[in-house]
Image (cartoon, rainbow, N blue to C red):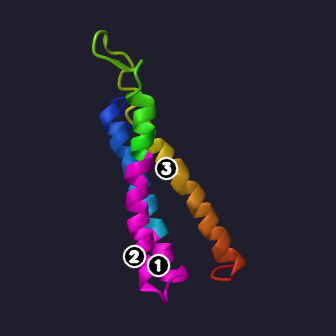
Amino acid sequence: MPLSGKNVIMREGILDTALCLEDHITELTNKTLFLEDQQYRNETKDDLEKLRFSYGRLYWNLYNSHDRCYDKKRGIQCGSQYHSMHNSMYVDLLSSILVDIYEQLIEYDYIQ
């Protein structure tokens, strides 16, 4: 898909990246770290979903819901440029988690 300045398309693309990273984290934990414990595999998947919604909501509110951003008397002031920020911040968090997972995989000889 060609690049677009449309916020909706950018937001969708960033969310796709986040979901891909979640899948990769889940795959790594399922196939390497927690082979012997289904509970940890389930918890990882559940925790990622909870994290996506709570972390996303926190950043959505920070960039899109504060008092100066939305004022009923003056109308919406912030615009839509921040409508994908929550997904971007979540991608950054997941990237950091992946680095930590790979460090554990290397340290404990799951991979070389």
Q: Quadrant of residue 43?
A: bottom left
Q: Which residues are magenta?
A: 26-55
Q: Which quadrant does the N terminus fall into?
A: top left
Q: In the rendered image, is residue 28 in sight?
A: yes
User: The residue under label 3 is which amino acid type?
Assistant: Val
What SS does tag 3 mark?
A: helix
User: The residue under label 2 is which amino acid type?
Assistant: Asn
Q: Nearer the viewer, residue 98 or 60?
A: 60
Residue 42 is tagged as 2
In the image, is residue 27 above or below residue 86?
Answer: below
User: The residue under label 1 is which amino acid type?
Assistant: Tyr
Q: Which residue does the numbered mark 1 point to in the structure image? A: 40
Q: Position of residue 49 (x, y in %)?
A: 38, 60
Q: Position of residue 33 (x, y in %)?
A: 55, 80
Residue at horizontal 40 percent and vertical 21 percent from the top? 67
Q: Quadrant of residue 87?
A: top left
Q: Cβ–Cβ below 8 Å for labels 2 and 1? A: yes
Q: Which residue does the numbered mark 3 point to in the structure image? A: 91
Residue at horizontal 37 percent and vertical 29 percent from the top? 65
In three-dimensional space, the C-alpha distance between marks 2 and 1, rounded to whole angstroms, equals 5 Å
In the image, is residue 76 above or below residue 108?
Answer: above
Chief SS of the magenta region: helix
